[in-house]
Structure formats: structure tokens, C-alpha cells
Image (cartoon, rainbow, N blue to C red):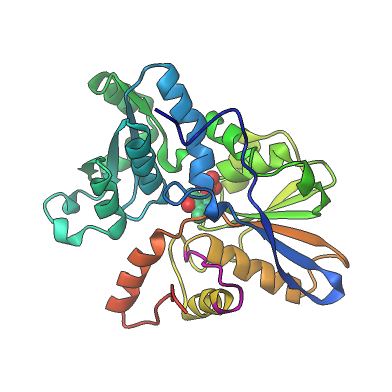
Amino acid sequence: MNSIFQTSEVFVSENQFIAEFSNSVTLHIKREDLLHPEVSGNKFRKLKYSVLKASELKKNCLLTFGGAHSNHVAATAAAGKLEGIATIGFIRGDELEFQKEKWSPTLTYANSCGMKLKFISREEYRNKESEAFLNQLQSQFPDAMIIPEGGTSELAIKGCEEIISEADREYDYICTSVGTGGTMAGLINASSSHQNILGFSALKSKHLSEEIKRMTTNTNWSINTNYHFGGYAKISVELIQFINDFFRKTRIKLDPVYTGKLLFGIFELAQKNYFPKGSKILAIHTGGLQGIEGMNERLRKKAQPQIITEL
Ligand SMILES: *Cc1c(COP(=O)(O)O)cnc(C)c1O
């Protein structure tokens, strides 16, 4: 069977012009969201070498972890379906086990791809990185390749190094959203020393910089923590308005958890003249659009404005 993760050719996404700010600062966006219709954005890059290794090791199952709205869970389920490999998702929140009607669109989708969903309590979920828990899982599922939450591993970082190419050396700033930091580490490794890699934290965490230092030895990067909007998956009416305006003007959808916050941050910094005169900025569109539907469900319940997906 043909793999969607062919090794022979590295696909480079198109960079699209978005805006010119004052001081001749320009912004382009790399359309990683168009990489694959189901395994989109950085989750494709992060899964690539794990899936290839699983097939090399004759492992016939991918086992991973995530929350009810996880882009990584959705991407792993889709990759398994397309590659003909079984998938198991350990999902945070055991209250969901017998309440299928409360499943998020992400979980319903993962299930429809054939992923076996195992719901665990929040306490148990906290163990997901402990060696004892992982050893026990591996002996319970000997044929499974275990992939950490968010997909971050050395193989994932290697995959993310393929996001940028020689041609992207013309950019002074490469900006990305940061969850676990695996994507950013790959970008840092693949960048040249004259480039600045700017990570926009999508969550409240004091340890992100330490995490990144563990994954790369280069030093041409920094993390901005001013645009997480209160924490992971937290949003505001202002953010939703920005995402909708951006879509109306560019026809490019942004997700509310990662790329919406990233672009909001870049626009605000550019308007405050943070970037030196003439800077060329490249923002990475890491995908994540599958999360919009779940966010809109939550917004509807709170009677707040929706993220528009059609004009
Ligand atoms: C998972 C995800 C990220 C964060 O990637 P990390 O490698 O965990 O930092 C960013 N953007 C989108 C759309 C994602 O789904």
C-alpha cells in the first residue's frame, strides 16, 4: 500500500503573502494547513517518521494520548485509517466513556476512523509520561508504537525540520505557535543563524523555554507568552473577531487554539513596531482547523459569536 508519508520527496508548502505593515515589514504565511486534507499541518510532520518507523518495526498499531479536542488524536486516527494501521487513543476524562452524546466532534471523527478510544481519569492521565505506566502499556499492547501526547519526540522534531526549506532563508523571522515545542524545535534546527525563530505560546507555562532547550542546541529563538489569552483553548470575543476578519480578508481559516493566537500576536507586534524596518516575517500555518467545530459548539452554548467557516 502507498504511504501518505512517502520518504523520497519532501513536500514544501507554499508561502502566501498576507500583509505589509509600516516600516516595510512584510508577512507571509506557510500553508502547512493544506499539506493533507485529514492529517494536516504540523501533525503530519510530527507523525511522519513515527509511522514509517512503526512499519519498519512491524508494529501494527499506534497508541497515543490526548484531550477531547486534540488535533494530534484526530491526525493519528486519520493516519491509521489511511495507512492501514490500528490506532488506540487514551483520552483524558473518564466521564465520557458512557456518554457518547457528549463526545466532541474530534472524538466522533477519531472513532469513525476506527480509533479505539480508552477514557481515563484526569489523575491517571497525569501518569502518561511515567516510565512505569508506559512500560505497563507496552506490555499490555506489545504490537503498539507508543507516541507521546501532542506527538512530540525526536522523530517528530526531525519531521518538523522539513517544514522550512532553503528558499525560506530569505525570512528574518519565522513565527510559530507553541504547544509542547516540538514543532518549534524542528524549525530552530532547520533555520540559519541569521534567522529569528519566534514562538507564540498557546498555553500558560513557565517551562516552555526549558523544554525547547532540551530539544535543540541553537540559540536563535525566543518565546512570547503574551498571546495565550488566559491559557490553553481559552479564547475571547476579540480573538474570534480577529479570526473572522482574517478569514474575510484572506480566505484563510485560522484555528482558535493555536494559529489564531499566533496571527493575532504577529499583527499586534507589527503594529507596535516590534519588528525592525524591512523585516520579512514568515508565519507557519500549522493547521488545526478540525478544532473549529468543537469550539463553535462550546461558543453556541455560551451564546457567543461563532467562528465563521464560509463567506
Ligand atoms: C499541536 C499544534 C501546535 C503545537 O505544536 P507543538 O509541536 O506541540 O508545539 C501548533 N499548532 C497546531 C495547529 C497544532 O495542532
| For residue 108, side relative to residue 49 (left or right) | left
Main secondary structure of the magenta stretch: loop
| Quadrant of the drawing holding the N terminus | top left
Please give the range of residues in magenta: 248-256
Among the 4 quarters of the image, the one containing residue 292: bottom left
Residue under the point 80% across and 73% down: 273
Q: Residue at x 70, y 36 (%)?
A: 189
> Which image quarter: residue 198?
bottom right
Q: Quadrant of residue 291?
A: bottom left
Q: Position of residue 249 (x, y in %)?
A: 60, 78
Task: State the image coordinates of residue 14 (x, y, percent, origin top left).
Answer: 66, 53
Q: Count every numbered label the image shows and give the total.
A: 0
Q: Give coordinates of residue 263: x percent, y percent.
A: 62, 66
Q: Residue at x 42, y 35 (%)?
A: 148
Q: Is residue 170 above or below residue 62?
A: below
Which residue lies most toward the top here?
A: 57
Give the x, y percent position of residue 2. 44, 30
Side (left or right) of 293 relative to 9: left
Examine the rendering and report whether any part of residue 153 can be seen. no
